Image: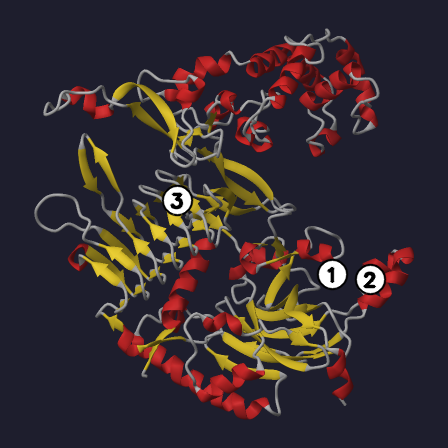
């Protein structure tokens, strides 16, 4: 039950706020990425902080909250569109306690708190995911979709399946915290 | 499948004992703990199947607009703004402008045009590339699409027919409701929501028009109402469905000449409509998105509110939330495999993500397996817990004498479960343990864990049944299951959990609701509930192995 999930200590960098970032993850434009603390970026994840709005200076491109997990091989890429003839990237904001399964591609605009996204999903451009929603494994969410709070989506295209139980917030919070405490280094 | 524990809700059945776990239907009375509610007033567990649900608000799942309940009916439970569903794949459609007219090179398009794009606008599906221009629906401006589509929808034959039907029944409804008000209100009426005037009228019309369909008479009182029903004039529909045989022939002709399957609209694409629609995919119209609702839930017996969401549609907070997880100890079951124990003792590294392995190997017939139940106390008071396996013959099934004989064999489970027989304590839940944010806190946990593991390793040989570990508000107890030699199926048993707690705040309402049977001492209370423990499925024993086994 409390079995730790071990990782090689040399493989991850731990920050002062408890973020654990794999050395084997591709973090582009780190100055444009915010991690809230106790967030885990797994091996092989790609986070594109370099795709920022045109213009000088640095802007926040991707922000993740606390107790998030970016699974192995995930791609996090800010959404883009051409508006009034100008091509631009737009920032991606992700709340607290968000777990993203392995090999999922995320181009969402906003992801709320306590959201669980399964494995092998595609979250299309400018998707808005509200609090406590859940995306089943292998779901394709088309661009511009809005996923309401406490909804389970699955399928291709992702469709509403059912309302999640009222205690989803507590369950997800306990799960993400528990996952973080289990995620322990081991000397090799 | 990993081992699981589900909790029983008897759903107001007089017999509170759960059905035997080997019946497939038993899974309907067991639920994961987090899906259950708890009524303080009745002191009972409630589930989604037995609570009464009320809509506390409507919202569109796409634009998240909170629709006032007054306009929900007028808008036919669908979003009346800019939200449409693709008739092809049910994805949300987006409004796109037409391609801008070709400009001379180097000249930027005028600002007014580029802001919203060029009319006409149409709806486009990002997923399957369907667009509304295919079915000749285009818009002058990109806002208020529903209003622009309204004229199409209102002229559709099904909505015209529905309007006519409503008109037709209107005088009858008014008459029946006024007569119901005038006459003595039947007391039984309120208990039968099905017997509303609409149902009665519909059933009467159906019985008259279609020979052989009996009238829906829920109880004999219905005869009294017969008078006004017969006063109704006969309804004539706008279109005679049976009369137009040409449509059917056209369909046959169409089906004969199809070249691609996608030309025919699939059943799924058509059955959301209230009317028989054409088979052609090219005739599919964009659908307005059905509204979702926020629901409040009440206890079915005492009508007290168990769940009351906040008004705001996208808020995940609740004004009232009485969930069973805050009242009943949560139980997690684990089945340490022999391998697992060895590995844990050696403190060996496990590959990340491999935590789901334990219990996946299955249980072998003829073997004995220890298992652990870790109980977590959510209450602010310490509790005493007693576990017992449910007796296998529930009193209810004895009444079914004819069924008893064949069931008898399967009723005896092919395994024996031993659980700690004496009551054991679980410490109170304290808020402080929730804030295990700091590293050192975890360090302590880890050490403790290591000790326990080592200790357990020594103990495991001689003691598997009993209390294994106590920390914070968690107590881990061990049990043991002995699986019969030729057992098959699943190791699944009902477990009765009773816990005693001290209700230290003797509120006056507490005294009223505490039934004497539950109350042992003045302030000690016992609550019992059933769970089903599923340890996994049995791997049938190989023939050869069986021979070698002593």
Pointer 1 and pointer 2: residues touching (CB < 8 Å)?
Answer: yes
Chain letter behind tag 2: B
Q: Which residue is mark 2?
A: B395
Chain letter behind tag 1: B
Give the Cα distance between marks 1 and 2: 8 Å
Q: Which residue is mark 1?
A: B17
Give the Cα distance between marks 1 and 3: 38 Å
Which percent across, then down, holds residue A11? 28, 74
Q: Is the residue marked by circle 3 packed among few (<14), some (14-19), or many (20+) residues within 10 Å?
A: some
Q: Which residue is mark 3?
A: B315
Chain letter behind tag 3: B
Mark 2 lies on a secondary structure that is helix
Q: Is the residue marked by circle 2 packed among few (<14), some (14-19), or many (20+) residues within 10 Å?
A: few
Q: Which residue is pictured at 53% across the width and 81% down the height? A: B340
Mark 3 lies on a secondary structure that is loop
Quadrant hosting residue B92: top left
The residue sitting at the left extreme is A56
**In the rendered view, does B459 fall on the left or right side of B387?**
left
Mark 1 lies on a secondary structure that is loop
């Amino acid at each position: 039950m409390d079995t730790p999930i071990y990782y090689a200590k040399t493989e991850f960098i731990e920050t002062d706020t408890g973020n654990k970032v794999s050395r084997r993850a591709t973090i582009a434009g780190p100055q444009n990425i915010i991690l809230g603390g106790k967030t885990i970026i797994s091996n092989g994840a790609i986070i594109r902080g370099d795709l920022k709005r045109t213009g000088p200076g640095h802007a926040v491109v991707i922000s993740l909250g606390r107790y998030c997990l970016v699974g192995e091989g995930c791609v996090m890429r800010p959404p883009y569109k051409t508006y009034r003839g100008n091509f631009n990237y737009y920032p991606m904001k992700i709340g607290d306690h968000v777990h993203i399964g392995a090999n999922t591609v995320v181009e969402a605009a906003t992801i709320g708190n306590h959201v669980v996204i399964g494995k092998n999903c595609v979250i299309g451009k400018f998707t808005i995911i509200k609090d406590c929603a859940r995306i089943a494994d292998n779901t394709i969410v088309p661009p511009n979709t809005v996923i309401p709070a406490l909804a389970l989506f699955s399928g291709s295209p992702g469709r509403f399946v059912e309302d999640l139980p009222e205690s989803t917030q507590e369950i997800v919070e306990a799960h993400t915290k528990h996952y973080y405490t289990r995620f322990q280094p081991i000397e090799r | 499948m990993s081992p699981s524990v589900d909790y029983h809700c008897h759903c107001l059945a007089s017999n509170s004992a759960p059905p035997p776990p080997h019946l497939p239907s038993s899974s309907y009375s067991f639920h994961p703990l987090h899906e259950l509610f708890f009524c303080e007033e009745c002191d009972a567990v409630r589930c989604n199947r037995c609570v009464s649900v009320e809509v506390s608000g409507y919202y569109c799942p796409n634009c998240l607009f909170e629709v006032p309940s007054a306009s929900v009916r007028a808008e036919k439970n669908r979003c009346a703004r800019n939200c449409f569903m693709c008739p092809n794949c049910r994805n949300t459609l987006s409004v796109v402008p037409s391609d801008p007219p070709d400009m001379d090179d180097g000249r930027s398009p005028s600002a007014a045009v580029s802001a919203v794009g060029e009319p006409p606008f149409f709806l486009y599906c990002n997923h399957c590339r369907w667009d509304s221009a295919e079915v000749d629906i285009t818009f002058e401006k990109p806002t208020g699409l529903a209003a622009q589509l309204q004229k199409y929808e209102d002229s559709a034959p099904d909505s015209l027919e529905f309007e006519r039907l409503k008109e037709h029944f209107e005088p009858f409804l008014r008459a029946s409701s006024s007569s119901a008000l005038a006459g003595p209100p039947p007391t039984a009426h309120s208990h039968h929501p099905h017997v509303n005037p609409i149902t009665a009228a519909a059933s009467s019309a159906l019985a008259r028009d279609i020979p052989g369909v009996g009238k829906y008479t829920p109880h004999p009182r219905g005869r009294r109402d017969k008078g006004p029903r017969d006063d109704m004039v006969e309804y004539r529909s706008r279109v005679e469905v049976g009369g137009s045989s040409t449509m059917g022939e056209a369909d046959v002709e169409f089906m004969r000449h199809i070249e691609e399957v996608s030309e025919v609209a699939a059943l799924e694409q058509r059955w959301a409509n209230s009317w028989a629609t054409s088979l052609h995919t090219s005739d599919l119209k964009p659908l307005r998105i059905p509204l979702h609702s926020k629901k409040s839930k009440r206890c079915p017996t005492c009508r007290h509110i168990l769940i009351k969401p906040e008004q705001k549609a996208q808020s995940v907070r609740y004004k009232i939330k009485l969930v069973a997880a805050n009242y009943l100890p949560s139980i997690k079951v684990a089945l340490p495999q022999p391998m697992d124990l060895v590995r844990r003792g050696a403190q060996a590294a496990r590959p990340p993500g491999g935590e789901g392995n334990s219990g996946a190997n299955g249980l072998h017939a003829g073997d004995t397996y220890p298992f652990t139940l870790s109980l977590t106390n959510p209450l602010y008071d310490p509790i005493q817990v007693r576990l017992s396996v449910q007796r296998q013959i529930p009193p209810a099934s004895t009444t079914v004498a004819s069924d008893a004989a064949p069931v008898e064999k399967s009723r005896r489970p092919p395994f024996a479960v031993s659980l700690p027989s004496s009551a054991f304590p679980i410490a109170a839940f304290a808020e402080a343990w929730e804030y295990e944010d700091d590293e050192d806190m975890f360090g302590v946990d880890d050490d403790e864990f290591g000790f326990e593991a080592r200790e357990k390793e020594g103990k495991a040989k001689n003691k598997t049944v009993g209390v294994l570990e106590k920390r914070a508000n968690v107590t881990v107890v061990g049990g043991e299951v002995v699986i019969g030699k030729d057992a098959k199926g699943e190791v699944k048993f009902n477990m009765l959990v009773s816990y005693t707690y001290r209700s230290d705040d003797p509120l006056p309402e507490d005294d009223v609701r505490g039934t004497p049977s539950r109350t042992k001492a003045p302030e000690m209370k016992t609550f019992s509930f059933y769970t089903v423990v599923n340890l996994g499925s049995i791997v049938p024993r190989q023939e050869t192995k069986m021979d070698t086994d002593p």
